[in-house]
Image (cartoon, rainbow, N blue to C red):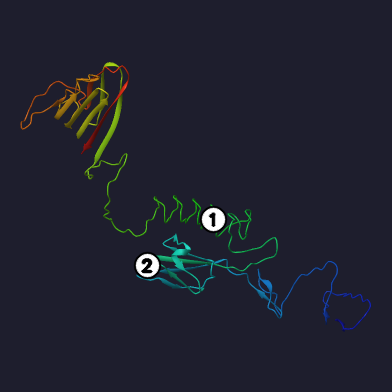
Amino acid sequence: MAKLLSGRLPKLNVGISSSLSALNVTGGVNIVGITTVTSISSGSTTGQSGQYLQSTGIGITWASFPTLRNVSTFVATSGQTSFTVSYNVGFVDVYINGVRLTESEYTASNGTSIVLNEACFGEETVDIISYNTTSNGSSGNSNIEYSSTAGIATYSTTAGIATNATYSTSAGIATYASTAGIATYATTAGIATYSTTAGIATVAQGLTGTPNISVGTVTATSYNGSGSNLTGITTSSTGSWTVTSGSNTYSFTVPANRNYVMWMRGNIPNGICVWNATVSITNTNVPVLGNQYAWYYDVGNQLVLTSIPNQIIGTSGSIITTSPAVSNTNTFSFGITNNSGTNQTVYYGYSSIQ
């Protein structure tokens, strides 16, 4: 074994002829040139696979990289608000039944407990995910556990080329994203599996069984199914005709097998015509039962009613059995003469109560 004692020498070349020889140096060592090292040990061990050398302040030791994220899962009890868990302040997410809470919905300031603003109903699954904040690596390959802009980075602050992003605030391909529309969990997405504000979310919190919900007036353009259990359904429609000069016929058509209140109205200088009716329509090949009234301003004579619907029959206080030959009784026609010399607009409408 070759040994060197400390001292001042102007130049010294050292060579070890055998690979079994050991070089012990007391004092500092300055090596210039290429150095090949096949094994490094700290103390009496070379560490475990994947470990790195970490300074302890007074020496070095082998250390393992920290876990990327830790998940703690709880089943809440009725009225529970506080959950005991270790986390890094500012690097924690809270999910209730898969729905991510915003930071304003809980308090996480001491690193040992998380307190919800609102108490749980009981039996909810509460997942608390904490992220490691230690930076592991050197310049150019900084490996961090939280990525603010990466959508495909394994550990990166800005990279989009690495393998995975476990957490991202703006990525659409991240596992958890606060603004992504295709994320598995999203707070504002309309197509998310779990959503706090979406109108078509798969899971809605707070409703169990078959809820009885009372609402005011509901307006819809259509509904699916037979509608046999629906009551108080009102169908309303309005329209208008462009009445040209001279005499012409104008009409509107309504669905059969319903009860209606109907009207027609034209009002121009020196010309008024008006009509209304209350009717019940069954089949389109039998008369319509009801009553109707019509009037026009004959003094001005600018709009003249020459005919009104002829399929409406009925006598107040009487049962009738007459069956005049009719067809298309759900179409209501009017004869109107326009003497104004210009086109005029006449309005009509109807409302149905099933």
Instruction: Give the mark toward the camera: 1 or 2.
Output: 2
Q: Nearer the viewer, residue 31 or 22?
A: 31
User: For the residue marked with disc 1, what is the amino acid?
Assistant: Ala
Q: Amino acid at mark 2?
A: Cys
Label 1 secondary element = loop
Quadrant of the drawing holding the C terminus: top left
Q: From the top left corner, tell me how far across and down residue 190 is, in percent.
A: 44, 50
**Residue found at x 23% / y 35%:** 351
Front residue of 46/247: it is 247
Whether residue 313 appears in this view of the structure is: yes
| Residue 274: x %, y % from top left | 21, 27
342 sits to left or right of 96: left
Q: How far separated are the C-alphas under marks 1 and 2?
A: 28 Å
On screen, 289 above or below 117? above
Q: Which mark is residue 98?
A: none
Task: Say if 290 sits above or below 227 in the image.
Answer: above
> Which residue is disc 1 drawn over?
174
Q: Which residue is mark 2?
A: 120
